[in-house]
Image (cartoon, grey):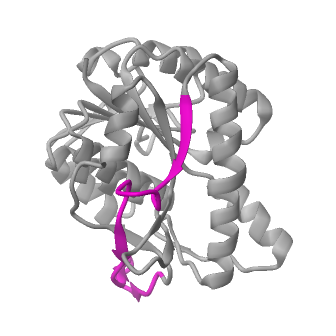
Amino acid sequence: MGLTLLKLGGELLETSQKQAALGRVVARAVTRLVVVHGGGREIDTALLAAGIPKRQVDGLRVTDGATLEIVVAVLAGTINTRLVAAINAARGRAVGLTGADVGVAPVKKAPAHRAVTGELVDLGLVGEPIRSPVPALVRALVTRGFIPVVACVAAAKDGQLFNVNADTLAGSLAARMGADRLLMAGGTAGVLDEQGHTIEALSRHDIRALVESRTASAGMVAKLRACEAAARAGVRHVAIVDGRDANALEHALERRGLDGIPAGSTRVTS
């Protein structure tokens, strides 16, 4: 059976009820599964409490040293541990990881980012996945029936930790694992047009047009680019799905290929 990479947006994991619901969905999945999660809103809350300013460009968090400490604590500590516990409470077999674990998501410092406004921005301690072999640790866990749950914190060769956009990490890991499907689950019914209707399918040309016209929201830009990269790298079925509907998401994980992409989703084609 093919492998599914499921990315869960942090907005889906903000309460114990949401964590329990998604824990049950993941635990019941019949497909081989790897989960990557974000946690942007909880990071924002922790930054506010610490008096640290937030800065984002095209959905990418500009990360200095103080921000990185918050990111690591929230993602690799609080959210990852809670999600793993919720999956295992539902009789799943989840194992918590970060991109810094051996071979999971090697990165280098991301180059300056050219924003959709044309501005060139140094993102600071933000990592960019590098070309690397299939992660042996993740493959071994999946082969033995475990569900790796990966927080989007990673490290360079010298041990420097980096914040990594969760969508970017999910797309890269899906490509490296040779996943059959990449499902980006968030808080909207796929990508919405100007009338608020779900766009059923997007080509690479469509994605470029959405980004360049600034029609896509800042948070959606990184997601679209990650989906495009995964499709280009050979992931056969890529979709942005509504993670708020636990039943639809559970149904999706019971299926394969296009049958596992629920209604109200946006498919991304190569």
Q: Decide if residue 2 is in sight here.
A: yes
Q: Where's residue 192, x and y in %?
A: 43, 40
| Figure quadrant of the N terminus | top left
Magenta extent: 94-123
Q: Residue furthest right?
A: 49
The residue located at (68%, 43%) in the rendering is 81
| Figure quadrant of the C terminus | top left
Q: Where's residue 59, x and y in %?
A: 49, 64
Residue 157, image quadrant: bottom left
Q: Where's residue 96, x and y in %?
A: 56, 43
Q: Main secondary structure of the magenta part?
A: loop
Drawn side of residue 170 relative to residue 89, left or right: left
Q: Decide if residue 199 is in sight here.
A: no
The residue located at (31%, 57%) in the rendering is 225
Give yes or no for residue 117 being in the magenta stretch: yes
The residue located at (55%, 31%) in the rendering is 94
Above or below: residue 115 compared with residue 223? below
Give yes or no for residue 116 being in the magenta stretch: yes
The residue located at (34%, 36%) in the rendering is 140
